[in-house]
């Protein structure tokens, strides 16, 4: 018989209250906030910075996969089954045949995409997992202001039909790179994705405004909201109440 404790999953990540809409998830995680504050310190250099980014994305990836991947009922014999035939886990697990694509946006997204790729290959059937690579950079005007994204190259596999397309980009600053990448998949890559999920360590209101406006179907996860340039009125209010 199945243990009733595992007939369904009630997992839901703890979140900071906001007004940015149901597809935005600002995670309430003091351990991540602590590690992120160290990573952002001007005193933190390599190799510690790289280790912290990996640790943060390992934590973020576990939350996102638990929340976003579909689930199924399984019957999995354990190591004790040779001595006890009843030693079988019968309950909910991630649906292993789910198709997933992790997109490495060079350069900042390369390491996070690799972290996600490794975890996906453990949780899912590896034949259902793919890693794509996009090479782009910020486009600046004569005054040094960001005015868009400049494409250099891309290495994209087969179609994205029914795939969970995941874009781990550490800093969602203007939303330009993310929107450009999603535009590319929607317009040039065959198939319709199951869902697009953006994964940031930090994200700004400017980025959230652009992404939610241009791609309202995209789900966004972030450890920290950067409102450093916001007014005192905005900072005193619930995030998103005053854009």
Image (spheres, rainbow, N blue to C red):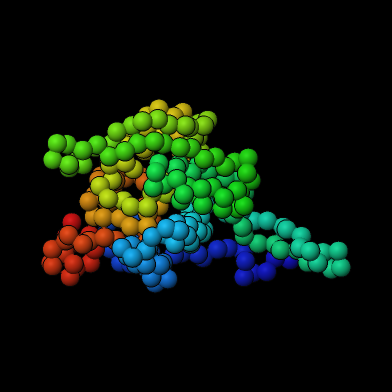
Figure disc tally:
0
Out of 100 and 224, give the one closest to the viewer: 224
Q: Residue at x 76, y 60 (%)?
A: 77
| Position above or below: 33 against 147 | below
Q: Is residue 130 above or below residue 116?
A: above
The residue nearer to you, when weighing 157 against 13, is 157
Q: Position of residue 179 (x, y in %)?
A: 31, 40
Front residue (pair 182, 22): 182
Q: In this rendering, would 34 be left or right of 145? A: right
Residue 25: x percent and y percent? 36, 59
Q: Residue at x 45, y 37 (%)?
A: 133
Image point 79% across, 64% down: which residue?
A: 79
Q: x and y percent of residue 89 in the render?
A: 71, 63
Q: Quadrant of residue 224?
A: bottom left
* Residue 52 in view (yes/no): no
Q: Residue at x 37, y 52 (%)?
A: 170
**Whole-percent x and y of residue 160?**
49, 35
Location of the C terminus by quadrant is: bottom left
Q: Farthest right residue?
A: 83
The N terminus - image quarter: bottom right
Of 104 and 101, the residue lying toward us: 104
Residue 183 quadrant:
top left
- Residue 13 seen in render: yes
């Amino acid at each position: 018989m199945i243990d009733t404790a595992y007939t369904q999953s009630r997992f839901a990540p703890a979140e900071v209250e906001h007004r940015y809409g149901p597809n935005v998830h600002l995670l309430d995680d003091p351990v991540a906030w602590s590690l992120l504050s160290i990573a952002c310190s001007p005193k933190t250099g390599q190799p510690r910075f790289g280790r912290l980014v990996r640790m943060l994305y390992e934590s973020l990836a576990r939350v996102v996969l638990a929340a976003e991947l579909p689930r199924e009922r399984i019957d999995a014999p354990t190591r004790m089954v040779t001595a006890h035939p009843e030693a079988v886990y019968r309950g909910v697990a991630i649906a292993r045949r789910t198709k997933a694509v992790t997109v490495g946006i060079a350069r900042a997204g390369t390491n996070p995409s690799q972290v996600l790729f490794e975890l996906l290959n453990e949780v899912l059937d590896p034949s259902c997992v793919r890693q794509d690579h996009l090479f782009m950079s910020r486009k600046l005007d004569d005054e040094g202001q960001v005015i868009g994204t400049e494409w250099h190259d891309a290495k994209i596999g087969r179609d994205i039909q029914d795939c969970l397309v995941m874009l781990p980009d550490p800093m969602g600053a203007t939303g330009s790179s993310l929107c450009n990448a999603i535009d590319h998949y929607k317009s040039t890559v065959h198939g319709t994705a199951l869902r697009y999920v953006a994964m940031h360590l930090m994200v700004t209101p400017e980025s959230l405004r652009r992404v939610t406006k241009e791609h309202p179907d995209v789900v966004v996860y972030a450890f920290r909201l950067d409102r450093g340039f916001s007014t005192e009125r905005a900072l005193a209010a619930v995030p998103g109440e005053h854009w």
